[in-house]
Amino acid sequence: LDAVSATLLTPYGLRTLSPKDERYQPAYRGDQRARDAAYHQGLVWPWLLGPYLDAHLRIHGDRAAAGRVLEPFTAHLAEAGLGTISEIFEPEEPFRPVGCIAQAWSVAEILRHALAAK
């Protein structure tokens, strides 16, 4: 969990690849082929926060800390697809939302932990 937190955790989910890996892609740009090639090479997936927070709670048992991990989504709900969560984010600041503007598994995992935090 410490290694994931230090290397993969971002404000909007987990990177799919460490920035230290030579295959890491810092942006989701270009034609369809270039974007598809970047899909699992470092882009941030919000739904991965679900299993990450499950592990965090199992180890630390701190629901308040887990809830703080979700705070960036409060602002995101008013951006991109209003009232929903984007599919993926670029893995570098400013963590631009990309991919489809509304992704059910992103919403489901964030909502699952937001409700559990109450």
Image (spheres, rainbow, N blue to C red):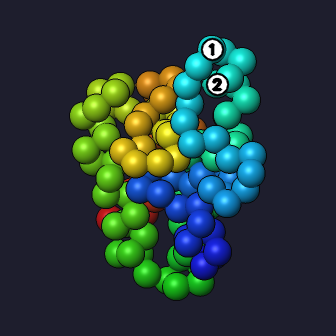
Task: Residue under label 1, please give it.
Answer: 31
Q: Residue 8's image quarter?
A: bottom right
* Location of residue 77 in the rendering, given as x and y in whole percent from the top left corner: 30, 37
What numbered label is drawn on residue 35?
A: 2
Q: Residue furthest front?
A: 22
* Location of residue 82 in the rendering, given as x and y in whole percent from the top left corner: 29, 27
Contact between labelled residues 2 and 1, with CB atoms less than 8 Å apart: yes
Q: How many other residues sit within 10 Å of disc 1, few (<14), some (14-19) or many (≥20)? A: few
* Location of residue 61 in the rendering, given as x and y in whole percent from the top left corner: 50, 83
Residue 20 in view, yes or no: yes
* Location of residue 55 in the rendering, given as x and y in whole percent from the top left corner: 62, 72
CA–CA distance between discs 1 and 2?
A: 6 Å
Q: Is residue 1 left or right of residue 77?
A: right
Q: How many other residues sit within 10 Å of disc 2, few (<14), some (14-19) or many (≥20)? A: some
Q: In the image, what residue occupies the spot 64% across and 41% down?
A: 25
Q: In the image, what residue occupies the spot 73% across and 29% down?
A: 37
Q: Is residue 78 left or right of residue 49?
A: left
Q: Can you say whether 94 is above or below 101 in the image? A: below
Q: Is residue 76 left or right of residue 3?
A: left
Q: Which quadrant, please, contains the N terminus?
A: bottom right
Q: In the image, what residue occupies the spot 51% across and 52% down?
A: 13
Q: Is residue 41 left or right of residue 71?
A: right
Q: Amino acid at mark 2?
A: Arg
